[in-house]
């Protein structure tokens, strides 16, 4: 059943239709999370290979640092350095000039001016621009959301909350933290849904959690058309809601653990 649900996930068909690399991105991040504690070097290599999508690597180093997973951190850094060296040796320094020129085009034309269509970009930045906000305001709002998500993840990954909750929060935070995330990148919600479903199956689902999971599963099917018709990137408020739900559940878990510790230590 889980395989059928995975294959039927709407973002699968969007990704296939665009011929994009969302499957690889998801495989690298989800694979790293599943190997994080069992095989830290493998996890670090998988994270380092994600360097081809730098916009999704903003918060992963933070999480690795605050949780003390330094073997993973340095393995990822070494992988990125090895990839950069290999590229330079194969193609010369000019490849970096071309790379930075392409990032400037993507930032100014695709993202800031909406050359590809803001309704295709499921981010807070795009939401502000669709509603007529200027570029500085869009960056300010996106920056505030990114900092808030980073602070929340920094706290969460230092607590004793369950690993599936931490992993799902990191996946959602990774998507929320970047201004440049198109609808085919919603493939990243697939492992987040899987982690939450596994956690709910093991411990029991919280009120409305199944409804939230169903909404996350369906949103790639509707995100682009709803944004084009209403100027609301539907995935963004839904992901913010899901992220808040995760934090609420994690805080409840941490509070329960602390209460249990106090009761056990009481005379």
Image (cartoon, helix red, strand yellow):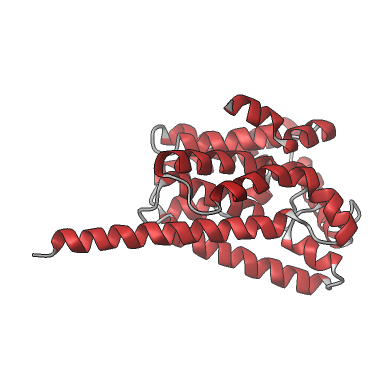
Q: Nearer the viewer, residue 176 or 247?
A: 247
Task: Examine the image and state in which quarter residue 80 appears.
Answer: top right
Q: Quadrant of the C terminus?
A: bottom left
Determine whether, in the image, residue 252 is placed left or right of residue 91: left
Q: What residue is at 16 percent from the left and 58 percent from the top?
A: 264
Q: Is residue 41 above or below residue 150?
A: above
Q: How many marks?
A: 0
Most foreground residue, 264 or 77 = 264
Residue 82 seen anywhere in this rendered image of the structure? no
Task: Identify the residue at horizontal 78%, vertical 32% (top origin).
Answer: 13
Image quadrant assignment for residue 203 = top left
Q: Position of residue 180 (x, y in %)?
A: 75, 54
Q: Quadrant of the N terminus?
A: top right
Which residue sits at x=77%, y=41%? 95
Q: Position of residue 100 (x, y in %)?
A: 77, 51
From the viewer's perspective, is 31 left or right of 215? left
């Amino acid at each position: 059943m889980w395989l059928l649900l995975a294959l039927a996930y709407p973002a699968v068909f969007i990704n296939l239709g665009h011929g994009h690399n969302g499957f690889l991105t998801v495989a690298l991040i989800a694979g790293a999370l599943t190997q994080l504690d069992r095989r830290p070097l493998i996890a670090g290599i998988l994270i380092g290979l994600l360097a081809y999508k730098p916009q999704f690597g903003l918060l992963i180093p933070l999480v690795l640092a605050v949780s003390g997973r330094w073997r993973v951190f340095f393995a990822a850094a070494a992988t990125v350095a090895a990839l950069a060296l290999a590229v330079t040796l194969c193609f010369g320094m000019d490849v970096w000039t071309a790379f930075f020129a392409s990032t400037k085009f993507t930032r100014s034309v695709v993202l800031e001016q909406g050359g590809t269509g803001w309704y295709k970009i499921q981010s807070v930045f795009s939401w502000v621009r669709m509603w007529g906000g200027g570029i500085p305001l869009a960056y300010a709002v996106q920056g505030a959301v990114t900092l808030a998500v980073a602070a929340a993840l920094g706290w969460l990954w230092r607590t004793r909350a369950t690993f599936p909750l931490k992993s799902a929060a990191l996946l959602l935070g990774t998507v929320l933290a970047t201004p440049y995330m198109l609808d085919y990148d919603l493939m990243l919600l697939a492992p987040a849904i899987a982690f939450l479903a596994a956690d709910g199956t093991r411990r029991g689902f919280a009120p409305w959690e199944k409804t939230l999971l169903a909404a996350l599963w369906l949103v790639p099917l509707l995100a682009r058309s709803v944004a084009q018709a209403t100027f609301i990137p539907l995935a963004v408020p839904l992901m913010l809601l899901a992220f808040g739900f995760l934090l609420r559940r994690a805080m409840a878990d941490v509070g329960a653990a602390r209460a249990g510790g106090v009761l056990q230590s009481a005379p």
